[in-house]
Image (cartoon, coloured by chain):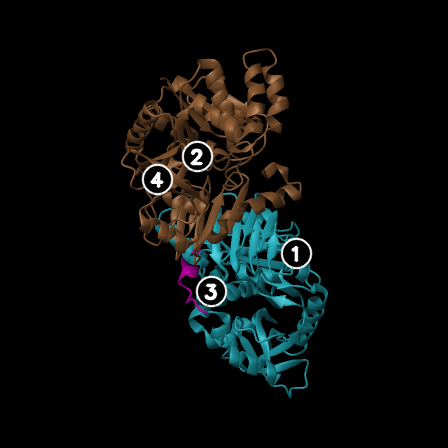
Chain colours: A cyan, B brown
């Protein structure tokens, strides 16, 4: 069976402000210094999936930039544009419907556009195994990450550790735990991190939509019927914004009994905010992560991103300092999750040039 | 007797880095948002002294910029250029010799180029009184500031509080005290802050050089003999760098019995470093001083100077954040005195474009 890659690239850009903006969200940033996250993702999955079989689901604000910057091998008619963000179920369903309508069916592998993977070759091996598992057994497969520490920032998946198959039966999805619970999870050996990477047949996930998310499925069917006709864009623009907003994890994966998990250890992380930059760049001996031209004196635990100017620090700790062409941000490291508050404030003040 | 103003404007630029640079030191900055400090100083003293009678002593690195930016009324041949910085005694002596050689004699009023005075009209009144005192009684007069709080950052002058004259006999100069000592000084009512502003006859200060700093005097005499001749520049370039480096406070004022102090209360301050910016700009209700385009969230006690970009902060306190065309600095407020360490580091690293 043919294998398709679907990259979910519709996320907004508030958590990496001022570097990320509405039209330039995280997936379009070069945080690693090696390339745009979207292109790193494509490069990673095209070890297994052909470039012409890659789909990108994005939104109207980013679509133009996306077309301009993604590697040329990705077909421009495989860049699917959501008229409105309706969470991951809608996004996954839209791509599945496109694959079924355009190509009949196929194994569909879904990825976030903005994750980091330190060992792409190991990842490719796991992805190959996952595709093979789905070809052999028609299940909903999620790629779980063997947890390397009791992380409170990720969701967890409990699985049947007595399952002798390569893909193991999932017993339960767990939201982000507190530290103590996370420690228990890791110690038990029954949990994997939920990476949000899925492998399934396009037709199978659509059947699951029909069962568990019938309202979403109805919308997808209407869109599917218009695909390839003159009405396609009109129907998408009309129907898509009405799709109930729900995540595929919550809407399907947590409900379906047919979910299995395949384990991987390939240095995965979701670089969700500025305080996680240590995942992408080595820390100095005082725990600072510095990109660009910097001079750090008596400075510890800081993340410093210098765009084009020199950034100097003296006697500070645990700060995030970001310099871009038009804005500087200095933020307490433990407030990294609140960077969106700055963006909201700028919006409220009508300073739209910075959004 | 004619009255001359001498502005000492040879200071370097390390404490206000990255705004101040070697060629653009503090006196050439517009920290108040109203004008360059040097021109604010000129404007202030020309309430009492004619503009054409103002001298500026500066150094070779700044001379060109100084000529370009000072108000046009200042005679360009009154901008005296030190071939090397040799502390305030040399600077004062050079100007005094120039006045004596060029104009015979005169009351010479000496000022720093980079002080701030909130009530310039009150200052002008005190300066007029000081000039009158010197005309009536040939003393070395210093303008003392009635201390408004136990500041540990200034030197103090103890005077005879039983002296009924307008200018009171000085008993002792005191270096910067610790907080407890400063409190005692203020409570005693016998101390004034040493503002470094002096009024005396040019001939009288030269006599004091002869008595208390004979080596300096000898150099000044050689320079004086060459003044107005073809050899002038050659002699200055050769002799000036050899003048012993000593302050006029330490070399003469602390030794001469002929020193008097005249009191003033006119909102004087020496904005010596970034942490003092509150003197020039109102603080917001969380104790922040912000210049330029800024958005400060959950931020307190910070000094934020935004040049041309937006500067945003979130969840930080007691920082100095400065944005300029080529460099950003983020510094703990209590390390403001150490900003020069950044400059030294840049020098050591050969990053001369930032000096």
Q: Which stretch appears magenta?
A: A237-246
Residue A331, x across and y down, in percent: 47, 56
Mark 4 chain: B
Q: Secondary structure at mark 4?
A: strand
Packing grade of label 4 (10 A; few <14, some 14-19, many >=20) is many
**Nearest to viewer (mark 3 / mark 2):** 2
Q: Report which residue position mark 3 lands on.
A: A87
Residue A336, x across and y down, in percent: 48, 61
Q: Secondary structure at mark 1?
A: helix
In terms of secondary structure, what is the magenta stretch mainly?
A: helix
**Nearest to viewer (mark 3 / mark 4):** 4
Mark 3 chain: A
Q: Secondary structure at mark 2?
A: loop
Q: Gap in Å between the C-alphas at discs 1 and 2? A: 67 Å
Check if mark 1's residue and mark 2's residue have beta carbons within 8 Å: no
Q: Residue furthest bottom?
A: A162
Q: Gap in Å between the C-alphas at discs 2 and 4? A: 16 Å
Mark number, residue B145: 4
Q: Gap in Å between the C-alphas at discs 3 and 4? A: 67 Å
Residue B354, x across and y down, in percent: 59, 39
Q: In the picture provided, is B90 more to the left or to the right than B111?
A: right
State which quarter of the image contains the C terminus of chain B: top right
Tags 3 and 2 on a common chain: no
Tags 2 and 4 on a common chain: yes
Q: Gap in Å between the C-alphas at discs 1 and 3? A: 25 Å
Q: Report which residue position mark 2 lands on.
A: B114
Q: In the picture provided, is B95 more to the left or to the right than A198?
A: left
**Nearest to viewer (mark 1 / mark 3):** 3
Would you say residue A25 is visible in this rendering? no
Mark 1 chain: A
Tags 1 and 2 on a common chain: no
Packing grade of label 2 (10 A; few <14, some 14-19, many >=20) is many
């Amino acid at each position: 069976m043919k294998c398709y890659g679907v990259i979910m690239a519709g996320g907004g850009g508030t958590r990496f402000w001022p570097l990320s903006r509405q039209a330039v969200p995280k997936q379009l940033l070069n945080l690693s210094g090696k390339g745009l996250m979207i292109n790193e993702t494509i490069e990673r999955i095209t070890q297994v999936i052909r470039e012409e079989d890659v789909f990108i689901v994005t939104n109207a604000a980013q679509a133009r930039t996306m077309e301009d910057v993604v590697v040329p091998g990705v077909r421009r008619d495989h860049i699917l544009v959501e008229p409105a963000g309706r969470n991951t179920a809608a996004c996954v369903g839209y791509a599945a419907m496109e694959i079924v309508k355009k190509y009949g069916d196929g194994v569909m592998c879904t990825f976030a556009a903005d994750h980091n993977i330190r060992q792409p070759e190991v990842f490719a091996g796991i992805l190959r195994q996952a595709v093979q598992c789905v070809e052999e057994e028609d299940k909903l497969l999620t790629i779980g990450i063997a947890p390397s520490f009791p992380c409170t920032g990720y969701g967890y998946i409990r699985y049947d550790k007595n399952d002798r198959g390569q893909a193991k039966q999932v017993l339960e999805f767990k939201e982000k735990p507190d530290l103590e619970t996370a420690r228990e999870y890791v110690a038990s050996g029954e949990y994997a991190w939920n990476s949000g990477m899925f492998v399934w047949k396009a037709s199978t996930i659509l059947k699951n939509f029909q069962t568990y998310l019938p309202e979403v499925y109805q919308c997808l069917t209407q869109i599917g019927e218009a695909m390839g006709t003159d009405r396609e864009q009109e129907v998408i623009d009309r129907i898509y914004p009405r799709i109930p907003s729900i995540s595929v994890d919550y809407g399907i994966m947590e409900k379906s009994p047919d979910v299995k998990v395949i384990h991987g250890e390939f240095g995965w992380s979701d670089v969700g905010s500025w305080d996680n930059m240590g995942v992408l760049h080595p820390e100095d001996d005082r725990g600072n992560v510095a990109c660009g031209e910097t001079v750090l004196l008596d400075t510890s635990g800081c993340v410093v991103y210098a765009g084009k100017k020199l950034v100097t620090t003296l006697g500070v700790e645990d700060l995030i300092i970001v310099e871009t062409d038009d804005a500087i941000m200095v933020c307490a490291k433990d407030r990294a999750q609140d960077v969106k508050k700055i963006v909201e404030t700028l919006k409220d003040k009508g300073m739209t040039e910075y959004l």
